[in-house]
Amino acid sequence: MSLADLTIAEAGAQLRSGGATSVDLLDAVIERASFTEAQLHCYLTIDHVGARSAAESADRELTAGTDRGPLHGIPLALKDNFCTRGLTTTCSSQILAGYVPPYDATVVSRLRGGGAVIVGKTNLDEFAMGSSTENSAFGPTRNPWDPERVPGGSSGGSAAAVAVGSALGAFGSDTGGSIRQPASLCGVVGFKPTYGLVSRYGLVAFASSLDQIGPLARTVGDALTLFEAVAGHDPLDSTSYPGAVPEMRADFETGPKGIRIGVVSELSGEGYEPEVAIAMTRTLNQLADDGAEIVEVSLPTFELALSCYYLIAPAEASANLARFDGVRYGLRIDGETVEEMMARTRAEGFGPEVTRRILLGTYSLSAGYYDAFYGQANRLRTKLIQELAEVHQRVEVLVSPTSPTVAFELGAKTQDPLAMYLSDVCTIPADLAGTPAISVPVGNNHQGLPIGLQVMAPALGEAVMFRVARAVEERAGFVARPPMAGPP
Amino acid sequence: MTAWESVIGIEVHVELRTASKMFCGCPVVFGDRPNTAVCPTCLGLPGALPVTNGIAIEWLARIGLALHCQIAPSSVFHRKNYFYADVPKNYQISQFDLPVCTNGWLDVVVDGEEIRVGIERAHMEEDTGKSLHQGSGGRIHSATSTLLDFNRSGVPLVEIVSRPDLRSAVQARTYAQDLRALVAELGVSDARMEEGSIRFDANVSVRPIGATDLGTKVEIKNMNSFRSLERAIASEIDRQINLVEGGGVVIQETRHWDEAAGATQGMRTKEGSSDYRYFTEPDLVPMVMVPATIERLQADLPELPAERRHRFAQLGLDPQVVDVLSGTEPGLRRVFDEAVALGADPVMGANWVTGEVTAAIRKAEATTADIPFTGKDLAELVTMVKEGSLSSSAAKEVLAAVIMGDGSPRAVALARDLMQVSDEALIGAAVDQVLAANTEAIARFRGGEEKVLGFLVGQVMRATGGKADPKLVNTLLRQRIT
Amino acid sequence: MPIEIDIAHVARLARLALTSEELDRYRSQLAVILDHAARVQAVDTTGLAPTAHPLGLTNVFRPDEIRPTLDRDEVLGQAPSTRDGYFEVPPALEGA
């Protein structure tokens, strides 16, 4: 078995037992990348020199007895909307082609400080706007389980890299489901933390009140480890949670006995593929067998979550993306006046989905429309939060499919923006509420395509969420290994 | 023939002299090499985030309290969205409908009359970078390119908006000057127009006297001194009146004061009015005012100008003197207050401070802080003059010496032998002596030659080595020979 | 519900120099999306305050202290056009 197929926990054990070095791990994932990248295109940049240097440094330190923690010497991939000093950061956009940030995101600093080896930057939907990674200006990423299909998005590159083994773990960002949905479509674990538990400083902003950074990994345990390495208050992010990160390991292996699990009636029915529904039922039965109590719950505001999201996220994005104007960095298309220069630069530099959302956002904030659109959506958001809090007085967690469908074919939804947006119906509520949610792969459909299930908990309820997720994972026994990764 | 009334409101932008910028830790600097005081946040780099400078908010509240404003129990920041090359994020973090301070006032004195100017609001925002338009004249319209320096981007900026309570260009100027003085005295800003740390815009409209509706207002920008502020507003009032009397209509627009032309000029109208698409800043969280903090800030306020004016008036000072003394450098005002506390005559003290002392300090090219002239010194000097032991001219010499560091007034006067003798008995004796030796002069004086008195005074001064109080000599001579 | 979207005006506000075909296409796409999103308008939200921060944080401040600035060369190195330490852009048509 290749080292590229190890979990982070296993790799860490090997490093400390002398079974492998960090350079060995890096070589293994680079080798895996070498025969998958041409087809999958997970990465936009592989930092051969920097990664090697970090791996060698990790080996020296570990040998000398300096142990920086569970990520020391572990090769990881980062979504290309994380600012990495000295390494191009493009957000998969022409407007940032070749841009090299002069600073590291806080998450990146913490990872480097923990001795992690950053292999490279992964592909995404441009500026994280999309659910398939087809909106990348540099070509799509393909699903390792079937390269004619999408890996999901917007963190498609990170999800595919972890699935195929060209990284042992990765980080992505989630605004409407962009970590969880690709995780589900690629058969890996993807976790979006409580809003504020992970610093956004250095994450190129899409929708400020929704964006969160989170891990993608082969196992729930690995996702927890990755999360712990970066979580915690950051004075550079005003929205960062000032309190302690919740204790999450104590009950990790306890199992679901006695937990009340809510099944959301609004997150089922038409539009949900039958095998997804079956996988859901099977999982719920397993949980019930293990002593959980399954409760039907209704959250009427969830029906409007998608609409709510599409009035809030593009509005914030329209302002966040205004800074891309050709003045200080990135693409510049010349003009006779600065107004012309800016307008041409932005028209050339942004792809259609980004342009569409900027127009939508600008419109919904404009004079005369603010209250009916953005204002109303934010009040509805409060209603959703209240409704969810109320339901959580009756159940500890909610379980739902992560996505109504398995991975769809490239090009299947690109003609109809609305159809694409519907991929996120299950994931969006947790972003609006700021609550933690995780996708766990539970099986494959008849085409071999992975199905993911989502566990949601109240704000700061990571402990019970991880506990239930672990239980789901244990019973599902899913093997996170697409055929493309080669023979085991 | 219609009688017109002008209605004026003033908007002020004040740069705070905090150590660091509003939303990042870059230093607040002036005049440094371009783009050397910048970071991801104030440069608008992708991924950067703002964090609010707590001291800047306190200073905003101080300004608000000094203007008798209400401090909002809860306040938020908004994004003001507009594209401009020196606005790095192409939105400015500002405050929209929940500013920190509202509903205050400032009392100003114009032509001896005290008027109350309402303060609608004072809020916090971040300053933009600086644009240097290249090409002839440094004006936008003839520029060939623009150079951008972001050192100023993100500097804390307080915007103070008055109610349209001003009725003349003179009133507007006085208000502007008084507001500037207040802000400088609070220590929150250098408030220098020439450096751009305080900037004024005016909103001007006219209406027939007696009308209650407001006329269309025109915004005036680019007034770079108090004098040009007054001139610009006066010019705009004339323009509007002439326009309306000629059958025209005032258009709502922004006009630019052209110092050389002595008139306001219309700027190129933008396509449509500005739609700033304000929404609550999602990268920042709401600010909830803590009553204990407000109490502390209130207690820490220095004496406000209006309070000081009243206090000076109570001391018996003339209105003109009150005016000048109020405008004097705070250090010197402190000297005056200390002197009065030590028993110096306030009227004399004020005259000395606003006259000779100010002149002497200016001559020494210093400020009060640099020189060893204290309230005790002033009290001593004034008292010596009042009791007659120093003549006015001697006192001037003593003052100059004290400022140079030669010691206290009494010590200097003694060392230089400048003390006047005011002892009636002593001077009387000298007078008698001189009169005894100058009987012919007495006769001539009695015969009508007034000038002879001067000669006799001179003789007494010589006899006393120049130390007699000439006034007293004069008086005693007259008493004896009239 | 909006019938007419002045897409040209919106594109101007957003500084996007789009062709008339693009404007047409985006206008109809926006209309479809907004139609769907306008369902939120039917909801009664009286008495509800808009969400400011999902966890209700308030009063986050930093002390008035100086932190390191960026190296100017690194900053200007990313700029499309600079002169004498300044960023350079074409002239502005309008004032701020």
Image: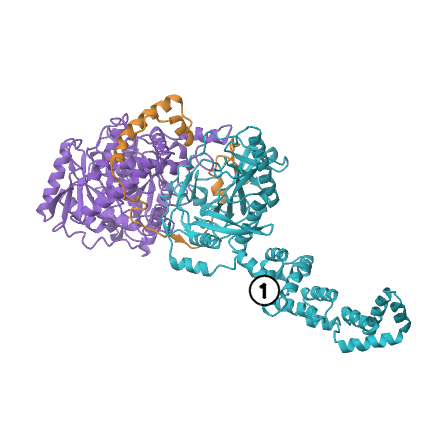
Report which residue position mark 1 lands on.
B337
Residue A231 visible in image: yes
Q: Chain of mark 1?
A: B
Looking at the picture, how far across and down is residue A347, in whole percent?
41, 28
Callout 1: SS: helix
Q: Where residue A320 appears, x then y in whole percent?
A: 38, 38
Q: Which residue is rendered at x = 37% and y = 56% of the image?
A: B290
The chain assigned the colour cyan in the figure is B
Look at the image and tell me in which quarter the C terminus of chain A lies. top left
What amino acid type should be assigned to the residue bearing mark 1?
Asp
- Percent position of residue C73, x then y: 50, 43
The residue nearer to you, when weighing B473 against A111, is B473
The letter of the purple chain is: A
Q: Is A327 placed above or below B457 here? A: above
Q: Quadrant of residue A153?
A: top left
Note whether A165 is above or below B298 in the view shown.
Answer: above
Q: Residues within 10 Å of mark 1 (few under 14, many from 20)?
A: some
| Colour seen for chain C | orange
